[in-house]
Amino acid sequence: MDIRFEFMPKQLELVHVPHNHPVDVACFSGAFRAGKTQAGVQLGLLLAYIYPGSRGLVGAAENTLLEDTTYQKYKELTPREWLPPKDRHHENWSGCPDELIFHWGDGLPPSEIWFRHLKDPERLKSTSFSWVHIEEASQVSRNTFNMLIGRLDYDFQVRYPEIPKRYRMFLTTNPEENLGWLYETFWTGDATAGLEVTPYFRLIRTKTSENYKLLERQPDFVDRLLNVYDKDYADVYLEGIPGALSRGGRPYNKFSRDYNLRPVEYNKEKDLIITLDFNVEPGVAAIIQEYGDDAYQIDEIFIERDSTTELICREFNRRYNQHEHLVRVFGDSTGGARSSATGRRTNWVIVQEVLSEVFHGRVSIEYVQNPLEIDRVNAVNARLLNAKGETHYFINPKCKMTIRDLERVRYKPGTMIIEKDTRDPDKRMLTHISDAVGYYIWARWPIKRTQQSKTVRRFA
């Protein structure tokens, strides 16, 4: 029985330990498609093989991450001859088991690999491990990390005498969007706590462009993403630089009056797009038309008090009742579950009914599942100004409330959470129309960090 894996140079840095300490803790921080998960899985299998009798833990913040990503990679890379005959067929690898057990024979004790989510790390406090792999460590707390280091105490044998016996912890992760404990621990040696770098802690940083296997298959991969990402997002997820998304307090920091404002008016020969954020105070909508890959916001609706979805749609009907082409509607996907109007009708039913009074047979309702707030903001920024310096979202200067939102919306201090203060009369008016714009942009040009649900289309 033998094991052969191919490692790229940065992945090899994770495998090879450059010190003599009996414990090694390595953070493999990499951009998108940099080979992080594969490196972690191959190292886990390698340790199971060279350390018979070892027990390894593969942990992540969520079960879905283990099932959809990490375990699938184990399924792909585990040599079938390591498994009992009954488990060697592909159909026997459905789901994600609690553990894999490799029986080596030749008098060697079996090796175990446990798969556990880390939502409740307390249940692991009484268990010891020979090695630990934390997947997407930026989603795991410092306390969980510290506790698991203390669980590296499970004895094992060594298959080859020239290989030292060493407990291993390795973290594979995207860089932190907002600087946190990983940055403090591995990039600066926890400088905020006044500590020096721990001798057996080490960092390996890798970029998307260093995955030569990916670029052999898709030479334009990085270039294509530069068209989609704004500069800060590209710094994190292509260059592997942590904290770039926390620069400044403005979520929409790519907006500039210099290059995003353009006095383009309504074109009766093109489809009209209306995107909504279902709300009572204020009620808002942005009106948009597309020219190729560019979107132009030609108008906005902003009803400050006592608004309803019906009022917003009737105002749209009043302004554009002569329009003869398609009306495409985007907005908050939760509009199917609640209504800003009285009665039992949902917001989307109200939209369909009211717009159809004027645009019968020419209404297309299109939306996708709402993304994470940070993903929606990043998608908007990428349209305002991408990493190549290109602008693809333009706003008519008369859309004063949209401009105010993009300039004045702020994060809560010290966080990446948008501030929505309903007690302050001025701040209460903010965030809604930029949310509406974000729902449209995410549906049309998503940053594919999360899985989108299928677009729903209904024609009235």
Image (tube, helix red, strand yellow):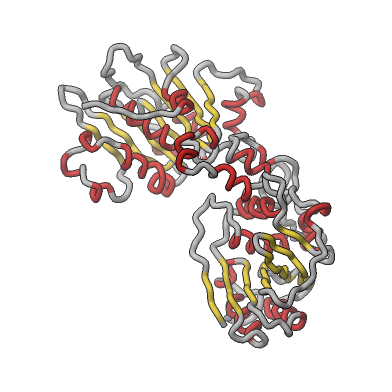
Q: What residue is drawn where x is 55% and y is 37%?
A: 31
Which quadrant holds residue 325? bottom right
Decide: is 232 above or below 318.
above
Mark yes or no: residue 401 visible: yes
Horizontal side, residue 368 vs residue 284: left or right: left
Horizontal side, residue 319 vs residue 460: left or right: right
Residue 427 point in image, percent of width and height: 79, 58
Horizontal side, residue 277 vs residue 348: left or right: right
Decide: is 430 above or below 239.
below
Which one is nearer the viewer's eye here, 296 or 165?
Answer: 296
For the N terminus, give its image quadrant.
top left
How many numbered dots are placed on residues in this image? Answer: 0
Q: What residue is drawn where x is 37% and y is 23%?
A: 153
Which one is nearer the viewer's eye here, 411 or 381?
Answer: 381
Q: What residue is drawn where x is 67% and y is 71%?
A: 273
Which quadrant holds residue 438? bottom right
Decide: is 124 above or below 296.
above
Residue 442 point in image, percent of width and height: 61, 59
Which one is nearer the viewer's eye here, 424 or 112?
Answer: 112
Residue 224 point in image, percent of width and height: 58, 47
Q: What residue is drawn where x is 76% and y is 54%?
A: 409
Horizontal side, residue 277 vs residue 134: left or right: right
For the C terminus, give its image quadrant.
bottom right
Which quadrant holds residue 76? top left
Mark yes or no: residue 424 visible: no
Residue 37 point in image, percent of width and height: 43, 37
